[in-house]
Image (cartoon, grey):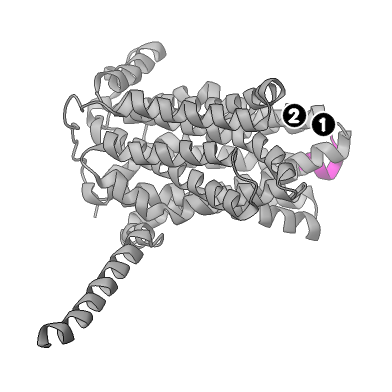
Amino acid sequence: MPTTTHKEPRNARSLATRIKRLAALLNPAQPFLVSLRQRDLRRLFAGLVVSQAGDWLYNLALLAFVYERTGSAAWVGITTAARILPEVVLGPIGGVLADRHDRRVVMIVSDVVRAATMAALAVVALAGGPVLLAPILAALCTAAGAVYPQCVAAVMPRLVDEDQLPAANAARVGITGLCVIAGPLVGAALLLLGSAATTFAVNGASFLVGAMIVAALPREATRRPASAEPEAHGSLRADLAAGWRALREHPDTLPLVGADFVSSTIYGALTVLFVLLGQKLGLGAAGYGYLLSALGVGGVLAANLANRAAASDRPRRALIAAVAAVGVPVVLLALTGSTAVALVLAAGIGAGTLTTEVVAETTLQRALDDAVVARAYGLVVPACVAGSAGGALLAPPLVALCGLDATLLLTGTAVLVYGLVAFVRPTLSKPILVHPEVVS
């Protein structure tokens, strides 16, 4: 009898402990709380939030302005391409610049130039200037920003301890997801209250605010790496080759970068397939927004899971679950007719995509030397952007050829096959950890 009377409370305490551990594991705020304890990282993230939120709110206004002036879907497509292509083409060069110069100065110049393009767009909108200037200025804005992500990726390991780097990356990618969700909403509100010119002006001001925030970062964290003095650099081609060589020589980086590329390609395809899936579920045009929002929410909620996965000393094993979280739900989307289930599956894809990105980027920062990390990252970012665009372009012909359900089955299966080939084999060597100087 005494044993029985004490067993239930012990079991209850055990259950409560497990619930608390699960809640801590799933708590999406944890990486943000860890990261924001560092003053300089708070500054970097503040500049990032201002710039990225402005980017997303201006995108909506830009397309609305072009369509209102031309009434042409073709012009909207041209403008969208003008916003994307410079990042693909100039991303590698941005990585070279980030390794050759003081990264704080590069980020400030990037923000100031982007602010100038927004001011010019506002003038075009107010003065009724030629609509051709809209895609041209949009392309210039993207070109000026092509160096920014590489600088952020290279600076972050200098601002936090190595054990906090996964949380910092999870928070940064989570911030991007929040900006994707909130930016268009703010942009829509500005369009309702004002005009496209007002939105362009607000975005320009956001870049100037971002520049001022970045200017407060310590020079010790953003200066050019000691091993990257001007005389250490060769031609542009040689610098790009050094970035590729750094990726190729480490056994873990290429498989992880490949997973990031595959996830980006699937994301691009889903931006098209969700339109058709919304129709299949009987949700109409609103279904696309519901599914895409679920994708973003899933990513944000998985921030702490991504943090834990990136902190693992076996990144390939961590990626197996992340790749499965992308591939399996895509397959299951072809088999469900339930809206609720589809939304949950979309959230799972978002969680897997975010985790893949966080693990891949953390591995790059840990494995590669500070003098070459921006150049390597400069090859990864445009590849992922190109993958996203390619997925969006490939989805329509696949649907026309195979149908929606078969396309979902094929794309999901392709992700799972990649995971098996790339990750289900022993790691060739342990990650080469670089311990950058941490700025207090």
Q: Amino acid at mark 2?
A: Gly
Is 432 in front, or is 228?
Answer: 432
The quadrant where residue 111 appears: top right
Using the rendered image of the protein, determine whether residue 297 is visible from the camera's viewpoint: yes
Check disc 1 and report the residue beneath it. 73
Q: Is residue 52 left or right of residue 36?
A: right
Q: Quadrant of the image for the C terminus?
A: bottom left
Q: Is residue 194 left or right of residue 413?
A: right
Q: Check disc 1: other Cα within 10 Å, few if <14, some if 14-19, many if 20+.
A: few
Q: Is residue 268 above or below residue 221?
A: above
Is 14 in front, or is 373?
Answer: 14
Report the number of numbered marks. 2
Q: Is residue 417 left or right of residue 222?
A: right
Q: Is residue 86 above or below residue 296?
A: above
Q: Residue at x 41, y 38 (%)?
A: 324
Q: Residue at x 63, y 51 (%)?
A: 338
In the rendered image, the residue lying farthest to the left is 2
User: Residue 62 colored magenta?
Assistant: no
Q: Amino acid at mark 1?
A: Ala
Q: Is residue 436 left or right of residue 56?
A: left
Q: Check disc 2: other Cα within 10 Å, few if <14, some if 14-19, many if 20+.
A: some
Q: Residue at x 27, y 67 (%)?
A: 18
The quadrant where residue 396 appears: top right
As helix, strand or loop, the secondary structure at mark 2 comes to helix
Tell me where the magenta segment starts and ends, as one range: 123-129
How far apart are labels 1 and 2 at the CA level?
Answer: 6 Å
Q: Which mark is residue 238?
A: none
Query: Residue 383 in the image: x percent, y percent?
Result: 48, 25
Check disc 2 and report the residue beneath it. 77
Query: Residue 192 in the image: x percent, y percent?
Result: 80, 58
Check if mark 1's residue and mark 2's residue have beta carbons within 8 Å. Answer: yes
Q: Residue at x 71, y 28 (%)?
A: 136
